[in-house]
Image (cartoon, grey):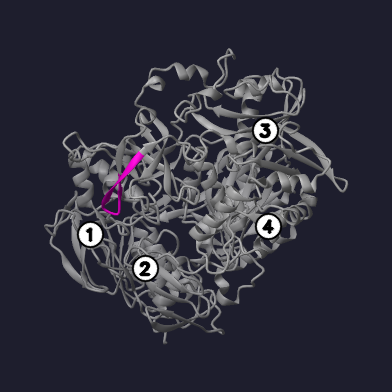
């Protein structure tokens, strides 16, 4: 539990409080302010994972989201895979383990809350480093509405990772004063632990705030764990800084190899010594700061290896004054070690040639190959990048409307320059927005910048190991090497996007933050073309991984896909109904009695509806009120049959087709008045059909005077079905003459029940005598119970959707979407009678004349009867046919069609099915076969109507 690599002092951690955590089964301690990575490094733990393909040891290589190696799995307080140890804030009770490149999804529900907030501002500043703070202060002082977001736990950025002073005080103290000033401005929203992960059109930015992740088990239950901020800004200032770039050399993936800037961060922010004996390999001046800072903290810096022929005379002198050896014109060619680096192999380097290597003992190898501006948000907003040869980096090129890049993200790499650039950009943005900048807008006094020695752009060190780049790792997370890039180029690939996909470089969690520009440079080098010509891979959101739970927010479970219930839902629950989801509705599937399974319950319910009386809650059927002088015209154009000839008080079945002539919905239409119809649709098709109607009205026929309104939830519907249904309805509504002559099939009547308006319709989806009872939902329970009371002498039986399906299938009534698949016309369903020959046109009519629609081998709806009278054919089963010699054709066996609906019938005393079969209407009486559990079951092809084909039961 000791922390031997914790510095004796310094850092921004709370040393007075000790936190306990477990990693790979071992208990360690840390402090508030630590990340999991810094606490592991303090404990001397460098290897935290293994690589995904090769299983090589991997450790912490950076200090934040650019780390390509430190993937961990969190187990407590909630299982979460593939997080970076560098971004996991330490809390008491944290349990985690390293990963072999990929993790495991949680197998328990996530009980945390997630939400989303919309926020509008004048200026959005992304990044709270020196540039971002300067920009935010300038904008806030003007009185503008400002949002400042930053992904770290506290503001300051690079100011927390060094020894700079501003206004004569340590930079973190100036940061604290700046944050306090921002808090005093009422129009400023300041969000830490918030990553702007996506930049979109019109000033829209998505950001993820980690609100309670750092609190662990102590997180308040009423506070959302993470929040997605949907920020809309008139202008955006991108001050996201820069990522340090590594240099590629042999065996550059060992634990203990780290970016030089990351080592400074671990030292100054977390009070951690990343090692005891260090070698620093650099191509620029910035890594000298790391060498000197570590030296002052007690780390033995064995050498600074500078690839530049003359190095940096000024920085060299600083190191020599401190007793640090500097090797100019030298490179690290490789490393030694197993679980951690033990030696750096150093060799002279001149004119691209590498000399003989010598081993320098170390347990820490720091690398700096320059800096890549973090231009991801700029690029996501379709900003073009330009290559800067001096920096060896891609910088923002053409401006993007409403978005400006500042500071290190724009290639300004000194502190004073970043502060000034942040203020300048903010004032320019305010002027463009016609907001007067503050008169007094003082910048803090920063150290005078000293011109650095020119950097050397070095993508990789020539491989002297003889492995031809096989151990020179470009993308540590993907185990992708220089050899992989060479193989891609050798295969003829020239586009950097193609190279990315061939090698998988940049497709892991870090999205190429350290490997992307390296890949461009190495590819250009291998192709012999300028780096500008290769360009970079596309930066796409999200900038860092975002949990699906956070994106879902509160839209999860029943709030994601709302559960709709009918007015009778509680009655169904009390009656023991088993429910199924139909669209968004919870519908009773069947009502089992003690000892019954679904098959037994459905057979009982079917028998009751066929021989006595049954009742169904059909309230979920889609209902659309169509009103207006041209209502009949609209329906004539949308339905295949005539609706304008329908008389008031009558009902007509109708079919709707798409423009391709294929059935999209069916249902009945009640004419309520000359200018008003009630259109009934399938449960799942209600929204689709209303949208279909509105689309035609708004885009094709805006001259029609019609209004369409959903009234699905304004009417509860109860079909009363069976030979005794007339007795039940007649007893409950004595004012209505229910005789066939007075109340014929496909008509409706309005009546009342103790003053409550009720509509009755003679419609049957079962083929039996049936009445549909429509009532306002406020009275639905009472009317349902009165129907049950009236039907008790006749043994009335509530039935569910499964029985409804059996009853309709026995009559050959199709369910759109089950017995159709988007390629079925009314003629295929045997419904040519529903296609009007009188109308000049309707949606889909022209398609009926297509040659393919006249093909006699089209799949058509038929019935199937298993010859053995016992096999229930699985829905979806394929249908095959023997050859004339009684043998199946050789594979692939041609398929005749498939089973669409299949049930056991109480009325038939045997199983039956509906199916779509090629040329089915001409195959009645044929025997075909259906594979079931490895056996070919012979079935007879029949007409689709299997019960009462004459229709005698319809009128009782």
- Residue 448 drawn above or below residue 92: above
Q: Earlier in the sequence, mark 4 or mark 1?
A: 1
Alpha carbon of mark 3 to alpha carbon of mark 4: how far? Answer: 30 Å
Sequence-wise, which precedes: disc 3 or disc 4?
4
Q: Nearer the viewer, mark 4 or mark 2?
A: 4
Name the spot of residue 593 as percent of width and height, x first.
58, 65
List x then y, in percent, for residue 942: 40, 36
Instruction: Give the residue at x 61% y 20%.
Output: 637
The first of marks 2 and 1 along the sequence is 2
For label 3, the crowd category at 10 Å Cα-Cα, with few meaning under 14, some 14 to 19 and many 20 or more, is some
Question: Where 519 sits versus 195, above or below?
Answer: above
| Residue carrying label 2 | 60
Q: Which residue is mark 4?
A: 569
In the picture provided, is 655 more to the left or to the right than 474?
Answer: right
Q: Do the CB atoms of the residues marked 4 and 2 lie less than 8 Å apart?
A: no
> What element does badge 2 sit on?
loop
Q: In the rendered image, which residue does mark 1 sit on?
A: 330
The N terminus: image quadrant: bottom left
Q: Earlier in the sequence, mark 3 or mark 2?
A: 2
Q: Would you say residue 406 is visible in this rendering? A: no
Alpha carbon separation for disc pair 3 and 2: 78 Å
Where is residue 375? Give x, y as percent.
47, 46
33 within the magenta span: no
137 vs 948, nearest the viewer: 948
- Magenta stretch containing residue 932, yes or no? yes
Placement of the C terminus among the 4 image quadrants:
top right
SS label for mark 3 = loop
- Which quarter of the figure has residue 72? bottom left
- In the image shown, does 869 or 900 lie closer to the viewer? 869
Residue 395 seen from this side? yes
Give me the residue at 50% from left, 41% from top: 947
């Amino acid at each position: 539990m000791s922390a031997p690599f914790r510095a004796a002092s310094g850092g921004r951690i709370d040393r007075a409080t000790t936190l306990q955590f477990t990693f790979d089964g071992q208990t360690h301690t840390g402090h508030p302010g630590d990340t999991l990575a810094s606490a592991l490094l303090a404990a001397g733990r460098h290897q935290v994972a293994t690589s995904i393909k090769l299983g090589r040891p991997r450790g912490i290589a950076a200090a934040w989201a650019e780390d390509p190696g430190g993937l961990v799995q969190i187990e407590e307080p909630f299982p979460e895979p593939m997080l970076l140890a560098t971004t996991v804030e330490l809390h008491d009770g944290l349990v985690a383990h390293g990963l072999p490149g990929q993790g495991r999804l949680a197998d328990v529900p996530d009980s945390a809350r997630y939400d989303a907030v919309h926020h509008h501002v004048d200026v959005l500043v992304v990044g709270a480093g020196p540039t971002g703070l300067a920009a935010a202060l300038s904008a806030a002082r003007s009185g503008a509405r400002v949002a400042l977001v930053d992904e770290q736990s506290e503001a300051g950025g690079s100011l927390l990772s060094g020894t700079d002073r501003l206004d004569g005080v340590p930079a973190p103290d100036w940061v604290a004063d700046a944050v306090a000033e921002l808090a005093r401005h009422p129009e400023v929203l300041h969000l830490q632990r918030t990553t702007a992960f996506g930049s979109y059109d019109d000033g829209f930015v998505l950001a993820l705030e980690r609100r309670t992740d750092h609190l662990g088990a102590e997180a308040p239950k009423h506070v959302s764990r993470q929040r997605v901020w949907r920020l809309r800004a008139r202008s955006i200032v991108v001050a996201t800084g820069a990522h340090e770039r590594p240099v590629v050399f042999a065996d550059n993936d060992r634990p203990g190899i780290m970016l030089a800037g990351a080592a400074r961060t671990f030292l100054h922010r977390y009070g951690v010594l990343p090692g005891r004996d260090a070698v620093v390999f650099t191509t620029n001046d910035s890594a000298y700061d790391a060498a000197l800072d570590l030296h002052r903290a007690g780390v033995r810096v064995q050498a600074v290896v500078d690839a530049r022929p003359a190095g940096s005379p000024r920085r060299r002198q600083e190191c020599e004054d401190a007793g640090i050896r500097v090797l100019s014109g030298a490179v690290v060619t490789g490393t030694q070690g197993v679980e951690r680096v033990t030696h750096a192999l150093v060799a002279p380097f001149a004119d691209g040639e590498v000399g003989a290597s010598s081993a320098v003992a170390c347990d820490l190898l720091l690398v700096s190959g320059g800096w890549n501006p973090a231009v991801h948000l700029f690029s996501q907003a379709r900003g073009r990048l330009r290559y800067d040869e001096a920096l060896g980096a891609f910088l923002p090129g053409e401006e993007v409307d409403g978005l400006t890049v500042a500071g290190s993200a724009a290639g300004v790499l000194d502190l004073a320059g970043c502060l000034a650039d942040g203020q300048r950009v903010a004032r320019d943005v305010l002027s463009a927005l016609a907001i007067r900048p503050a008169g007094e807008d003082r910048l803090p006094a920063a150290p005078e910048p000293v011109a650095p020695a020119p950097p050397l752009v070095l993508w990789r060190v020539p491989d002297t190991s003889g492995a031809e780049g096989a151990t020179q790792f470009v993308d540590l997370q993907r185990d992708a090497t220089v050899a992989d890039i060479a193989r891609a180029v050798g295969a003829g690939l020239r586009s950097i996007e193609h190279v990315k996909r061939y090698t998988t470089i940049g497709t892991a969690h870090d999205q190429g933050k350290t490997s992307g520009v390296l890949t461009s440079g190495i590819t250009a080098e291998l192709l012999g073309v300028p780096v500008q010509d290769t360009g970079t891979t596309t930066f796409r959101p999200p900038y860092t991984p975002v949990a699906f739970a956070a994106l879902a927010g509160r839209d999860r479970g029943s709030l994601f896909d709302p559960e709709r219930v009918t007015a009778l839902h509680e009655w169904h629950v009390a009656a023991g109904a088993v429910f199924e989801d139909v669209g968004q509705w919870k519908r009773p599937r069947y009502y089992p009695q003690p000892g019954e399974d679904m098959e037994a319950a459905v057979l009982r319910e079917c028998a009751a509806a066929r021989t006595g009386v049954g009742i169904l809650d059909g309230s979920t059927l889609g209902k659309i009120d169509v009103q207006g002088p041209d209502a009949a015209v609209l329906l004539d154009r949308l339905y295949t049959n005539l609706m304008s000839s329908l008389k008031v008080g009558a009902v007509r079945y109708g079919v709707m087709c798409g423009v391709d002539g294929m059935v999209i919905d069916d249902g009945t239409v009640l004419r309520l008045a000359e200018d008003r119809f009630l259109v009934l649709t399938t449960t799942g098709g209600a929204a689709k059909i209303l949208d279909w109607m509105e689309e035609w009205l708004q885009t094709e026929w805006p001259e029609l005077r019609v209004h369409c309104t959903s009234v699905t939830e304004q009417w509860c519907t109860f079909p009363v079905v069976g030979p005794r249904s007339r007795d039940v309805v007649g007893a409950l509504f004595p004012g209505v003459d229910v005789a066939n002559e007075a109340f014929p099939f496909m008509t409706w009547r309005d009546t009342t029940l103790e003053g409550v308006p009720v509509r009755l319709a003679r419609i049957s989806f079962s083929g039996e005598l049936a009445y549909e009872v429509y009532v306002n939902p406020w009275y639905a329970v009472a009317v349902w119970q009165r129907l049950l009371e009236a039907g008790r002498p006749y043994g009335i039986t509530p039935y569910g959707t499964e029985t409804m399906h059996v009853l309709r299938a026995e009559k050959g009534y199709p369910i759109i979407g089950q017995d159709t698949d988007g390629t079925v016309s009314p003629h295929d369903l045997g419904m040519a009678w529903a296609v009007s020959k009188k109308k000049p046109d309707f949606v889909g009519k022209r398609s009926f004349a297509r040659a393919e629609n006249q093909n006699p081998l089209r799949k058509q709806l038929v019935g199937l009867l298993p010859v053995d009278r016992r096999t229930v054919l699985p829905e979806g089963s394929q249908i095959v046919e023997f050859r004339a010699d009684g043998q199946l054709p050789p594979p692939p066996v041609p398929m005749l069609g498939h089973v669409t609906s299949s049930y056991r019938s109480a009325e038939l005393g045997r199983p039956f099915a509906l199916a779509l079969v090629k040329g089915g209407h001409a195959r009645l009486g044929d025997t075909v076969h259906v594979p079931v559990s490895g056996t070919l079951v012979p079935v007879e092809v029949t007409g689709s109507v299997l019960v009462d084909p004459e229709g005698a039961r319809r009128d009782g």
